[in-house]
Amino acid sequence: MATTDLACKVKSCSFHHPDDRCAAGEIQVILNSQDAICDTFVGRDTDTKPAGNAKQEVPLEIRSARMADDARSVNLGNVGHLYEGDATNLEPLVSCNAENCTHNKHGVCFADQVTIDGDAAFVSGDTVCRMYSPS
């Protein structure tokens, strides 16, 4: 299975877990101008969709199991995690459309660790993937 150790510093996201983990089943990193951002960001107490237009879905053969409702990237193990509850999966698959990143292989991030920053993010464009490394 393609998983990466994901640290999420975006406390304003609904998927943020108190241990700086991500409770989404799968996240989408997209290239936004010169930066890679987390397009899965959903602000707390809002009913918004991710800001980007990426429609990529990681093929099933790369996943160990279908862990998420791909329409919202929500880990269905326990939807209470959206507001600091318990999540059953804190290692989401990281799909990526930054084709020029050295960690991207066929739309999946294969970095050993990914850090998403943007502590005061209001929209996905306020986040940044710190592991983005143009080739």
Image (cartoon, helix red, strand yellow):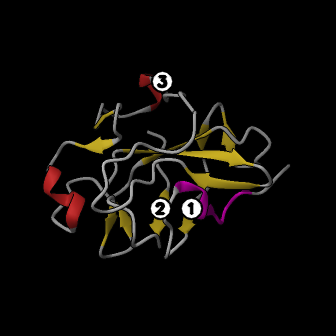
Residue at mark 1 to residue at mark 2: CA–CA distance:
5 Å
User: Answer yes or no: do the residues labelled 1 and 2 have beta carbons within 8 Å?
Assistant: yes
Kindly state the secondary structure of the residue where label 1 is placed. strand
Above or below, 11 relative to 132 = below
Q: Does 69 lie within the magenta span?
A: no
| Label 3 neighbour load within 10 Å: few <14, some 14-19, many 20+ | few
| Amino acid under disc 2 | Leu
The residue indicated by pointer 1 is 114
Left or right of residue 87: residue 33: right
Q: Quadrant of the N terminus?
A: top left
Residue at mark 3 to residue at mark 2: CA–CA distance:
20 Å
Residue at position x 46%, y 69% in the image = 10
Q: Which of marks 3 and 2 is nearer the N terminus?
A: 2
Q: Which of marks 3 and 1 is nearer the N terminus?
A: 3
Kindly state the secondary structure of the residue where label 2 is placed. strand
The residue indicated by pointer 3 is 59
Residue at position x 49%, y 75% in the image = 120
Q: Which of marks 1 and 2 is nearer the N terminus?
A: 2
Q: How many marks?
A: 3
The percent coordinates of residue 125 (x first, y second) are 60, 57
The residue indicated by pointer 2 is 6
